């Protein structure tokens, strides 16, 4: 049983996928499995997944009909075997020590959830947020005003979770936008102790043609639903 299962949902990511997967393979924390979930991608992403799976024993490739990022993540959860779980978007990448840092913080502080800061990548620009150090929050009571950036809370990909969170919890497959923000209150409700580091270990690629930047009415409604749920929490 690997310590950490890394789930990567993939759709039309052939330009970015290798950099993403390579950043996981080069982690200083080696006890991991990598689950590549090809969500019916029409480009060469599926072939790239198979190439990695044939070359590396800790990489597994799965191909499913196109059903959206939530369904792909949920499928990955069902196939994972790690004691801890994490997610990466296939056009992003991570610092070489991200999982070792988060794992050590969890163990040192006896936490069940670890969150790191993000580094934004916009074209050739790399934008870092200010350091606010390491913070501990109990029973999901996170003060977002103390975070380096409030969006560090909103996304699912800059976190390391104990598997207990996913024994019953799943991403909402009816949502096409803000699906990770939607489950943040559920995660926080389950967390007994959370550790946060502002170090920007997750590299978040911002591009105009990504799902986050191509909005429509349904996505706007999903975003409102997610924010209302978080506000109520």
Image (cartoon, helix red, strand yellow):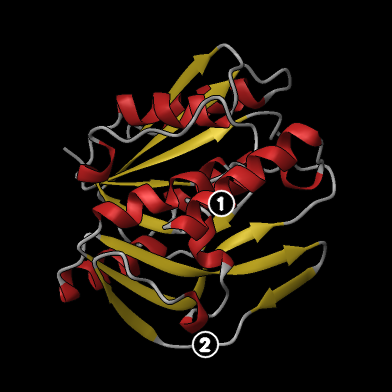
Is residue 120 found left or right of 69 in the rendered image? right
196 with respect to 162 (left or right): right
Query: Residue 193's image quarter?
Result: bottom left
Q: Residues within 10 Å of mark 2 (few under 14, many from 20)?
A: some
Location of residue 18 in the rendering, given as x and y in whole percent from the top left corner: 61, 42
> Foreground residue, 116 or 60?
116
Is residue 54 or residue 34 the one in the foreground? Answer: 34
Element at label 1: helix
Report the front residue among 169 and 233: 233
The residue that appears at 56% across and 25% down in the rendered structure is 174
Q: Is residue 148 above or below residue 60?
A: below
Instruction: Mark 2 vs mark 1: give the one in front.
Output: 1
Q: Quadrant of residue 60?
A: top left
| Residue depicted at x 26% and y 44% | 165
Q: How packed is label 1: few (under 14 Cα within 10 Å), some, or many (20 or more)?
A: few
> Residue 180: where, in percent of width, then height?
51, 45
* Left or right of 203 on screen, residue 86: left
Q: Quadrant of the N terminus?
A: top left
142 vs 216, left or right, is left
Q: Residue 82: which quarter of the image?
A: top left
Residue 60 in view in this figure? no
Q: Which of marks 2 and 1 is nearer the N terminus?
A: 2
Check the image and report above or below for 218 versus 21. above
Q: Mark 1 points at which residue?
A: 228
Q: Name the residue under label 2.
A: 131
């Amino acid at each position: 049983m690997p310590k950490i299962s890394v789930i990567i949902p993939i759709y039309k990511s052939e330009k970015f996928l290798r950099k993403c997967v390579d950043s996981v393979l080069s982690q200083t924390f080696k006890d991991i499995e990598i689950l590549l979930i090809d969500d019916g991608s029409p480009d060469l992403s599926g072939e790239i997944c198979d190439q990695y799976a044939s070359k590396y024993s800790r990489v597994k490739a799965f191909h499913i009909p196109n059903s959206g990022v939530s369904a792909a993540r949920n499928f990955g959860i069902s196939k994972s075997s790690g004691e801890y779980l994490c997610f990466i978007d296939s056009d992003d990448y991570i610092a070489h020590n991200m999982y070792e840092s988060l794992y050590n913080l969890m163990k040192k502080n006896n936490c069940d959830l670890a969150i790191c800061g993000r580094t934004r990548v916009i074209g050739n620009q790399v934008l870092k947020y200010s350091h606010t150090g390491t913070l501990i929050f109990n029973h999901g009571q996170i003060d977002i005003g103390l975070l380096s950036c409030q969006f560090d809370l909103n996304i699912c990909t800059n976190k390391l979770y104990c598997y207990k969170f996913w024994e019953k919890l799943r991403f909402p497959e009816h949502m096409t936008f803000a699906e990770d923000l939607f489950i943040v209150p559920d995660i926080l409700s389950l967390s007994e102790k959370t550790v946060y580091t502002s170090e920007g270990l997750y590299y978040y690629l911002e591009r105009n043609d990504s799902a986050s930047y191509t909005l429509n009415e349904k996505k706007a409604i999903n975003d409102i639903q997610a924010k209302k749920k978080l506000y109520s929490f």
